[in-house]
Image (tube, rainbow, N blue to C red):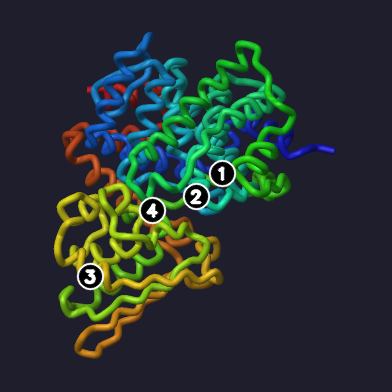
């Protein structure tokens, strides 16, 4: 009887570009655009640029591009830097079916090794899709422990699979690499998110780094246990692991086609509420000091820290529902500027956040499109009551945005790091990524 790891490994080893539908290729290109934009924008944070410089200084050979930082490094170091930068502003895509953010764990590793191997654009797309699929499906099968933050865990085997795919490994070799890489998965908690400790941003960088390292360790002769995902994700990082869920529907539609793109610069758990708030902003007119109270009901099961004390810094603000609601009502935006330090200390936002009450409802979920995932009620001092409900979040595959809106997002978040000509060239090149004979044709655009 075929086991789930055999099925996943065979899928990863045998899926080729020729098997992919037009929709799957389009989805991959859009994920590349979104992820690259998040990485480039992330280098606006000083700690990320410092890490990029360290990565370059510690590297030989310098074959992989640190995207938009004007530096090159050895692939593992470049992946560490790019994967870390890409989550700093909380604008990277994700997948609600598998949890977490597959692309930021998989793409930096695939791109860095692809540069070293001079892989084609088709090979990059192929490796991204299979790495994304494995990462997301292992996430589906896992139920993390209460304070375990599922950032980096199944991203490690996802990155390893993408790198192994670029080298043409067999299904049996792929299985060994999945097992080795899973045993190297980082263990992370939610606590840094609520305290605003930016070591949290290294979760994805570490998973990509260790995904590449796992392939090297396999090549060096290291071995893994028979079923590492069940062991690590089912008993160490998680409470349960259900193998059948990892392969259910495999091949029907790729997970990369079922992703979501972020249009609020904060934790995904904020998004149902913020969609409702922004809808209210578009149709109603009132000032912050006219608000008596804001009542939010949203999905149960989210970390309690998200409704905790007022955030002390930018990162923690991105994981705080009352702050996100207050800043959206005062600023009428939820983009990256809404979470900078200057609005965080704004008197109106501080006062309004104290009027936001959040209730978690275990019957609400983001995994379905036919029921609400947030309800907002704003009571004004003049007695007016304003209500809004969110069912399907903007940017999700079930409520998609246009390609032009993704381009607009890319242009906005990278505007301080890329000149217009370079940004235009990046977009045009990604739009025809499959035609490239060497991915260095693309990365060279981001090497200045």
Of the image marks 3 and 4, the number of the one nearer the N terminus: 4
- The mark nearer the N terminus, 3 or 1, is 1
- CA distance for labels 3 and 4: 20 Å
**Circle 3 or circle 1, nearest the eye:** 3
Residue ID at (52%, 37%) = 187
Would you place residue 18 above or below residue 393 in this image?
above
SS assignment at label 4: loop
Single out the mark in the foreground, 3 or 4. Answer: 3
Q: What is the number of the mark on residue 267?
A: 4
Residue under label 3: 352
Q: Residue at x 80, y 37 (%)?
A: 2
Which residue carries the number 2 mark? 95
Is disc 3 in contact with disc 4, using a CB cutoff of under 8 Å?
Answer: no
Report the Cα–Cα distance between label 2 and label 4: 13 Å
Measure how far apart labels 4 and 1 are at the Cα level: 18 Å
Element under disc 1: helix
**Disc 3 to disc 1: CB gap under 8 Å:** no
Residue 178 occupies quadrant:
top right
At x 33% / y 32%, what residue is drawn?
429
Location of residue 368 (image quadrant): bottom right
Across and down, in percent, residue 336 comes to 25, 50
Circle 2/circle 4 CB separation < 8 Å? no
Q: Is residue 435 visible?
A: yes
Give the residue at mark 1: 136
> Mark 4 or mark 1, which is nearer to you?
4
Q: Which class describes the residues within 10 Å of circle 2: few (<14), some (14-19), or many (20+)? A: many
Residue 391 at least partly seen: no
Separation (CA) of disc 3 from disc 1: 38 Å
Q: Residue furthest bottom?
A: 383
């Amino acid at each position: 009887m075929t086991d789930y790891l055999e099925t996943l490994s065979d899928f990863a080893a045998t899926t080729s570009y020729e098997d992919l539908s037009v929709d799957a290729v389009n989805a991959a290109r859009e994920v590349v655009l979104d992820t690259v934009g998040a990485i480039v924008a992330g280098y606006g944070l000083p700690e990320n640029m410092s890490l990029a410089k360290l990565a370059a200084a510690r590297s030989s050979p310098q074959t992989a591009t640190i995207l938009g930082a004007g530096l090159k490094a050895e692939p593992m170091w470049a992946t560490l830097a790019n994967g870390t930068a890409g989550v700093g502003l909380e604008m990277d895509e994700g997948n609600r079916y598998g949890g977490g953010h597959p692309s930021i764990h998989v793409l930096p590793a695939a791109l860095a090794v692809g540069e070293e191997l001079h892989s084609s654009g088709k090979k990059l797309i192929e490796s991204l899709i299979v790495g994304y699929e494995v990462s997301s499906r292992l996430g589906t099968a896992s139920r993390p422990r209460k304070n375990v933050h599922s950032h980096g865990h199944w991203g490690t085997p996802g990155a390893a699979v993408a790198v192994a795919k670029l080298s043409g490994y067999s299904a049996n070799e792929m299985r060994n690499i999945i097992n080795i890489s899973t045993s190297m998965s980082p263990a992370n908690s939610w606590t840094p998110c609520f305290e605003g400790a930016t070591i949290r941003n290294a979760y994805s960088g570490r998973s990509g780094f260790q995904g590449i390292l796992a392939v090297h360790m396999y090549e060096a002769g290291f071995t893994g246990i028979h079923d590492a995902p069940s062991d690590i994700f089912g008993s160490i990082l998680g409470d349960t692991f259900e193998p059948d869920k990892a392969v259910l529907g495999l091949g029907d539609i790729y997970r990369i086609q079922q992703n979501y793109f972020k249009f609020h610069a904060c934790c995904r758990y904020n998004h149902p509420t913020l969609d409702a708030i922004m809808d209210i902003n578009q149709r109603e007119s009132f000032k912050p000091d006219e608000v008596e109270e804001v009542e939010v009901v949203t999905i149960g099961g989210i970390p309690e820290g998200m409704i905790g004390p007022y955030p002390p810094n930018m990162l923690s603000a991105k994981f705080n529902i009352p702050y996100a609601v207050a800043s959206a009502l005062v600023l009428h935006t939820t983009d990256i500027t809404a979470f900078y330090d200057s609005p965080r200390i704004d008197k109106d936002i501080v006062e309004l956040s104290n009027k936001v009450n959040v209730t978690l409802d275990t019957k609400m979920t983001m995994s379905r499109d036919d029921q609400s995932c947030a309800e907002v009620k704003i009571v004004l001092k003049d007695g007016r009551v304003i209500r809004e409900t969110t069912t399907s979040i903007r940017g999700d595959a079930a409520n998609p945005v246009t390609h032009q809106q993704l381009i607009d997002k890319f242009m906005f978040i990278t505007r301080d790091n890329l000149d217009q000509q370079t940004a235009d060239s990046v977009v045009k090149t990604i739009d025809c990524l499959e035609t490239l004979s060497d991915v260095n044709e693309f990365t060279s655009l981001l090497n200045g």
